[in-house]
Image: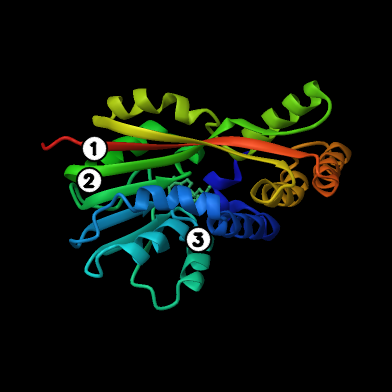
Amino acid sequence: MDPYNNPDQQSDVTIQAMVTRLEERGRHPVFAGMIGAYVSQVPAEVPLRVLDLGCGTGVVARAFEARLHPGSALVGADVSQRLLEAAVALSPGSRIQWRKVDAEGLPFGDSEFDVLAMHTLLSHVVGPEALLREAHRVLKPGGALIVFDADHASTTYGLPEYARMRAVDQKLAEAIATHPDICRQLPRLLKKAGFQLDRHRSELFSECGRGDFWLSSVRGFARLIPALGILPEEEGRAWVEAMLASHEEGTFFAAGSYYTFFASKGPG
Ligand SMILES: C[S@@+](CC[C@H](N)C(=O)[O-])C[C@H]1O[C@@H](n2cnc3c(N)ncnc32)[C@H](O)[C@@H]1O
């Protein structure tokens, strides 16, 4: 059901909900801070070849462009023509090259990139192992891989009834991520693909009382739940109303964890 592994097959309502959510979360200071925390680790003194794989509307590619050496070659690549069109419209005058690709079989030569970032891509692809093998192939020896993803399986939206809360959390996570627990697999999958895991960061992002980042997620779900049939109509409407009411009343609770993995390809 994950709409993010085949965006171009989705309805206009779903695509528009995705564009809005990707851009809103990219602008949120906490989320932007998580992106900045790894973008700022990439050396800016020398020109680099950088690939933002699964770039969506281009949030991360634009962050790299703002920081990196002006001689750097930046490629934003995604399977979705419609999200790439949004990326082009959102970056007038940019020097980012936008490419339509399937990350599980990349149209790039061996050892083309110094840095490859994938920001909430891996949890959405059908074959994460094939994707990591491709990432290893297209990186130069000594190149850096940055994998950022949500631990969707830990995302929770507070409701008074525990059983209902857990059931809805699970349905939402499974509806919007093909692999809701991919972060828990990454140390093993990176090693299997030939990478060395150098370090990682983890962040718990919670909102209590009133929502902002997670409220935008609830508003996205208000459109996605009926469009994708995630919950029965009445149950979906009641969930959205309960979350919005808790925000108005100052009793909102939502939280989720994010991980950044810094890995490298050996010197060859
Ligand atoms: C959750 S979005 C993340 C977009 C962007 N990285 C961001 O964080 O704003 C996941 C992206 O992965 C892309 N995607 C999914 N499967 C893909 C594949 N096999 N190859 C390339 N891109 C893919 C989707 O089209 C979508 O743009």
Contact between labelled residues 1 and 2, with CB atoms less than 8 Å apart: no
Query: Which image quarter: residue 246?
Result: top right
Of the numbered discs 3 and 1, the one sitting upstream in the chain is 3
Badge 3: residue crowd in 10 Å (few <14, some 14–19, many ≥20): many
- Please give left or right for residue 12 compared with residue 35 in the image: right
User: In this figure, which residue is indicated by the disc labeled 3?
Assistant: 57
Q: Looking at this view, name the residue that lies furthest to the left.
A: 268
Q: How is the image coloured?
A: rainbow
Q: Which amino acid, by three-letter code, is at mark 1?
A: Ser
Toward the viewer: 76 or 165? 165
Location of residue 261 in the rendering, given as x and y in whole percent from the top left corner: 37, 36
Query: Which image quarter: residue 174?
Result: top right
- Please give left or right for residue 176 compared with residue 44 in the image: right
Give the spatial CA distance, label 3 vs label 1: 26 Å
Q: Is mark 3 within 8 Å of ligand 1?
A: yes
What is the quadrant of the N terminus in the image?
top right
User: In this figure, which residue is indicated by the disc labeled 1?
Assistant: 264
Of the numbered discs 2 and 3, the one sitting upstream in the chain is 3
Location of residue 214 in the rendering, given as x and y in whole percent from the top left corner: 67, 46
User: In this figure, which residue is indicated by the disc labeled 2?
Assistant: 139
Q: Is mark 1 within 8 Å of ligand 1?
A: no
Location of residue 6 in the rendering, given as x and y in whole percent from the top left corner: 54, 48
Residue 102 visible within the image:
no
